[in-house]
Amino acid sequence: PNYISVSKLANLLNCRIETLIKDLTKLGFANISHNYILSREYVELILQEYNYVLPASQAAITSKNIYDGLKAPANPKFLQRRPPVVTIMGHVDHGKTTIIDYLRKSSVVSGEHGGITQHIGAFQIVTPVSKKSITFLDTPGHAAFLKMRERGANITDIIVLVVSIEDSVMPQTLEAIKHIKNSGNELIVAITKIDTIKRPKDREKAIERVTNDLISQDIPVEKIGGDVQVIPISAKTGENMDLFEESIILLSDIMDVRAENSLKTLVEGWVLESQVRKTVGNVATVLVKRGTLQKGKILLCGNTYCRVKLMVDDLGKDVIKAEPAQVVEVRGWKDLVRAGDEVIQTVSESVAKKYINRRIALQAVEKDAVTVENLNEQRREEAE
Ligand code: GDP
Ligand code: MG
């Protein structure tokens, strides 16, 4: 049943109980006290009649935010530079996968390992000139990303928009531009496939055309005094790829991307992917956003936890420690976690278990309860 007490409703609405009782009395309710129970229908009526604004999130502890209690605010003293996290977007066939393949291959060749890459949804490269790291996520269309975005988590720092020199701006380019503007991410444009136009004059003209098309979409490119770099590249021949990689470093230097990282920092991260691997068990790809992940640490996620047994990178190689912006496959989960969920370190297994039990109890109560969230959800549905 969907019932709520007057005091709890006042709490949710962030108003004084006395004010709410006065309003209810005006609506015809009699003998109302703080523990008077209202049904959902009445709650709706009250909200409509008095235009109460539901706060975006409730102050009360819920199953969704219970783990926030484990997070300490970032200590500015321990903020360290970290690699930028980059996603690539653009129209189909404009060269996203080819760029990723090029970058992966060059990072594999430069490493000592054989080169069989395991798909973990992300990888890190070291740039050829400045020798700095960049993390590329290669599944930006993934449901997990939508979920993280819904939670207000913007896990990427920079979006690379690819535009083919042959086709210029296309429908999905426009969609990507819309997303970039909404997300507030920093932007770099890569004009791809420049090897397809050999004559320098023709190539220059084609680049000019793409640049002008971007300007018509209000992209503040450097040509018109803006700060969006436009890099013509070919991921096929490798032309300008070093310039492209360094342009990302240049931008991240300006952005000064940082994360808290000290011996005492409790790890936080996001699950990008999860699966059951044969002979290995439950694994989760985790993007570390804070702290340093190491074997033996206890991680809490959803309704389960893990004592980190092993961490491997996209080459299947053991990883001793994963720092902010690094992505590793974490092994040792009791149960399968869900992509898009947040990962938080606890000081012990018993703390993790305690929080999980409290969360499960909250989830049982919330199933039928009137909350700001499900009221907002209902309002959204009705508005549609
Ligand atoms: P995606 O859909 O954005 O991932 O595009 P792909 O990377 O799969 O590329 C689509 C097609 O364009 C493939 O046939 C690629 O070989 C080709 N392609 C991608 N990049 C280049 C490039 O720099 N030069 C040339 N000539 N072809 C390219
Ligand atoms: Mg592709």
Image (tube, helix red, strand yellow):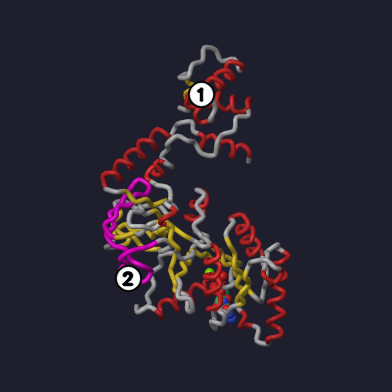
- Mark 1 or mark 2, earlier in chain: 1
Residue 313, placed above or below residue 347:
below
Q: Label 2, on which residue? A: 317
Residue 21, placed above or below residue 233:
above
Q: Amino acid at mark 2?
A: Lys
- Which part of the image, by quadrant, shows the C terminus? top right
Residue 129, placed above or below residue 338:
below
Q: Is residue 271 visible?
A: no
x, y (%) of residue 213?
Answer: 71, 68
Going by the image, does 372 lie left or right of 321? right
Which secondary structure, mark 1? strand
Q: Nearer the viewer, residue 38 or 158?
A: 158
x, y (%) of residue 63?
Answer: 41, 40
Residue drawn at x 68%, y 87% is 199
Q: Which residues are magenta?
A: 295-323
Q: Is residue 104 visible?
A: yes
The crowd level at tag 1 (other Cα within 10 Å; few <14, some 14-19, many 20+) is few
Q: Return the residue found at the far front.
A: 77
Q: Nearer the viewer, residue 354 or 375?
A: 354
Going by the image, does 134 lie left or right of 345? right
Residue drawn at x 50%, y 48% is 151
Residue drawn at x 49%, y 57% is 155
The answer to if 319 sits in the magenta stretch is: yes
Q: Amino acid at mark 1?
A: Ser
Q: Return the residue found at the far bottom.
A: 199
x, y (%) of residue 209?
Answer: 72, 74
Q: Nearer the viewer, residue 271 or 227?
A: 227
Q: Label 1, on which residue? A: 39
The answer to if 186 sits in the magenta stretch is: no
Residue drawn at x 51%, y 31% is 12
The crowd level at tag 2 (other Cα within 10 Å; few <14, some 14-19, many 20+) is few
